[in-house]
Image (spheres, rainbow, N blue to C red):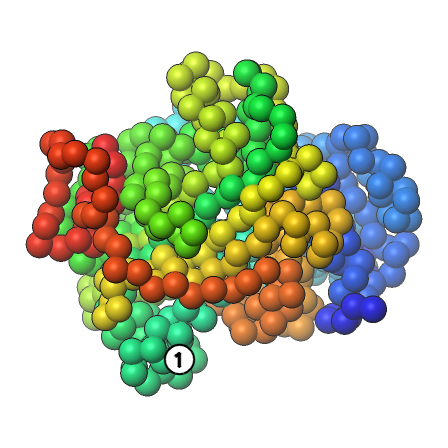
């Protein structure tokens, strides 16, 4: 028997039934009370139609487009109540969020996804292919709907759960360094990060999941959406820009408009490496793939002195994907064209490994700390069906966010940083394996094989240019 955390009344519509949608299904069935005949999945593929039929869930086999999405969703939500869980690719999140406000329906997604045409073959200049304008658009739109039906933007594992882990980590760091902390508001949290002397945060991930089959040449293999990784991986690298940073990285640019909490680099995130650190392996390369949390965290943790940012941490993803995905990216970068064949590793074929996903917080009194979830494939398999360790960290965050939305139905637009991290982690924790805290004296100036020319700032190890491997 599983604990029911919340009830959702009215139609429940999941958009997209890919690796994350399938993994989220058993968690919804376990922990959320709803009427089975009100559950519809919109998914163009018939591949998993059998699974939906088995669970008695309606399958609307259709791809949402600019032309049909409004009419389709209107017909599914006739009574001004219900819930949309958007786990698709190629469906415009902002359009869905607007429509859900009109329909009186709660909403959650895991990424600000645009209609097709944004990620590839776009006429837009690189500055406009970043996530900054997408997020700014969501934030501006949110101001029109105060107290509207709750709409959570970007809440999976990352973006999502990592914002909750960051809060837990900051409280832990405060306790371990004797700093009094009882943050309640956004300003309190930002002040706490500043008081602790946090220069920056990596979303530091190491995925070690492997299968017994060597990666076939020409097939892009990943542990979650291949389309998702390619889309964000070939946007420009992007990061929250801390107030301690002395100089922009090569080809780095500030944004010309808006609050300016981030910068972008004129090269793909999937080909931009930083030195980072995860438990188990220690020092490693991570990729600066752009993500919403690289923007929401620096924005949330800015301490303002009038119009001037007094304090802000640097923040970015430092992603070490699974070995097959590293090889796939290497192949794709070399070939200079998108792969034709794609494959997502399933829980059944993965033989070993797991996913370590956490926050690496640096520059404070104890040097650096990694705080996060360490989940093996064996643990994930035992916890719930249809997913690997990576999926489990994402789907349990979706579950936690759905519960929080059901408990807080009229908050308007929110991001993970603005939710109750303790409540969300309470729901999610049983699915995260071990939550571990590791301190380390590692800095990006350590660990070199021989000496080569590099842009080094020995006076401050925590400069972004020291992390960046050019
Ligand atoms: P996936 O590629 O396995 O599945 C995506 C699904 O969307 C597919 O089944 C596809 O048929 C469906 N789809 C495509 N076009 C559609 C349309 N027009 N209308 C409706 N459905 C459509 O991807 P996934 O691994 O399940 O990931 C789903 C989404 O979640 C992606 O956008 C991904 O970037 C995001 N994601 C976020 C996180 C996070 O931590 N925040 C983690 C993993 C994935």
Q: Residue 447 vs residue 220: left or right? A: left
Please tell me whether residue 396 is drawn above or below residue 411 in the rendered image: above
In the picture provided, is 422 more to the left or to the right than 266? Answer: right
Q: Quadrant of the N terminus?
A: bottom right
Q: Where residue 173 sits: x, y (%)?
A: 35, 73
Q: State the image quarter where residue 175 is shown.
A: bottom left
Q: Relative to 106, is 352 above or below?
A: above
Q: Quadrant of residue 220?
A: top right
Question: What residue is shown at x 31% (from left), y 30% (from top)?
Answer: 267
Q: Is any part of residue 389 visible from this angle?
A: yes
Q: Which residue is mark 1?
A: 183
**Rendered position, 441 above or below 88:** below
Identify the residue at horizontal 23%, vertical 53% (top origin).
443
Crowding near the residue tagged with mark 1, few <14, some 14–19, many ≥20 C-alpha atoms within 10 Å: some
The C terminus appears in which quarter of the rendering? top left
Residue at the spot 43% in from the left edge and 41% down from the top edge: 320
Q: Nearer the viewer, residue 462 or 183?
A: 462
Q: Nearer the viewer, residue 446 or 164?
A: 446
The residue that appears at 54% across and 74% down in the rendered structure is 422
């Amino acid at each position: 028997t599983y604990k029911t955390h919340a009830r959702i009344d009215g139609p429940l519509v999941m958009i997209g039934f890919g690796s994350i949608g399938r993994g989220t299904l058993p968690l919804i069935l376990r922990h959320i009370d709803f009427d089975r005949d009100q559950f519809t999945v919109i998914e163009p593929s018939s591949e998993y139609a059998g699974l939906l039929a088995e669970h008695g869930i309606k399958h609307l086999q259709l791809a949402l487009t600019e032309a049909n999405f409004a009419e389709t969703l209107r017909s599914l939500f006739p009574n001004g109540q219900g819930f949309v869980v958007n786990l698709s690719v190629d469906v415009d999140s902002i359009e869905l969020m607007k429509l859900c406000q009109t329909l009186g329906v709660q909403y959650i997604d895991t990424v600000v996804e645009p209609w097709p045409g944004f990620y590839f073959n776009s006429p837009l200049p690189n500055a406009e292919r970043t996530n900054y304008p997408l997020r700014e658009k969501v934030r501006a739109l949110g101001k029109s709907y105060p107290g509207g039906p709750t709409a959570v933007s970007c809440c999976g594992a990352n973006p999502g759960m990592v914002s909750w882990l960051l809060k837990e980590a900051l409280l832990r760091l405060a306790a371990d360094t004797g700093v009094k902390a009882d943050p309640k508001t956004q300003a309190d949290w930002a002040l706490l990060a500043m008081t602790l002397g946090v220069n920056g945060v990596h979303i530091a991930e190491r995925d070690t999941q492997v299968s017994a089959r060597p990666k076939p040449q020409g097939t892009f293999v990943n542990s979650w959406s291949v389309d998702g990784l390619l889309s964000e991986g070939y946007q420009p690298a992007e990061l929250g820009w801390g107030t301690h940073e002395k100089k922009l990285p090569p080809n780095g640019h500030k944004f010309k408009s808006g609050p300016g909490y981030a910068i972008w680099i004129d090269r793909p995130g999937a080909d931009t490496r930083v030195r980072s650190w995860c438990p188990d392996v220690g020092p490693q390369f991570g990729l600066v793939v752009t993500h919403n949390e690289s923007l929401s965290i620096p924005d949330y943790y800015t301490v303002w002195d009038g119009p001037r940012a007094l304090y802000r941490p640097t923040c970015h993803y430092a992603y070490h994907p699974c070995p097959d995905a590293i090889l796939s990216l290497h192949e794709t970068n070399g070939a200079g064209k998108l792969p034709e064949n794609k494959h997502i590793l399933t829980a059944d074929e993965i033989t070993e490994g797991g996913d370590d996903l956490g926050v690496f917080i640096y520059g404070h009194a104890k040097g650096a700390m990694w705080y996060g979830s360490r989940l093996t494939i064996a643990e994930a398999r035992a916890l719930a069906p249809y997913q690997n360790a990576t999926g489990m960290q994402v789907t349990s965050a979706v579950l936690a966010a759905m519960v929080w939305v059901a408990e807080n139905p009229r908050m308007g637009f929110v991001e993970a940083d603005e939710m109750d991290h303790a409540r969300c982690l309470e729901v999610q924790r049983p699915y995260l394996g071990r939550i571990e805290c590791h301190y380390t004296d590692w800095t990006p100036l350590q660990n070199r094989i021989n000496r080569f020319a590099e842009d080094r700032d020995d006076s401050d190890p925590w400069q972004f240019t020291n992390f960046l491997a050019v």
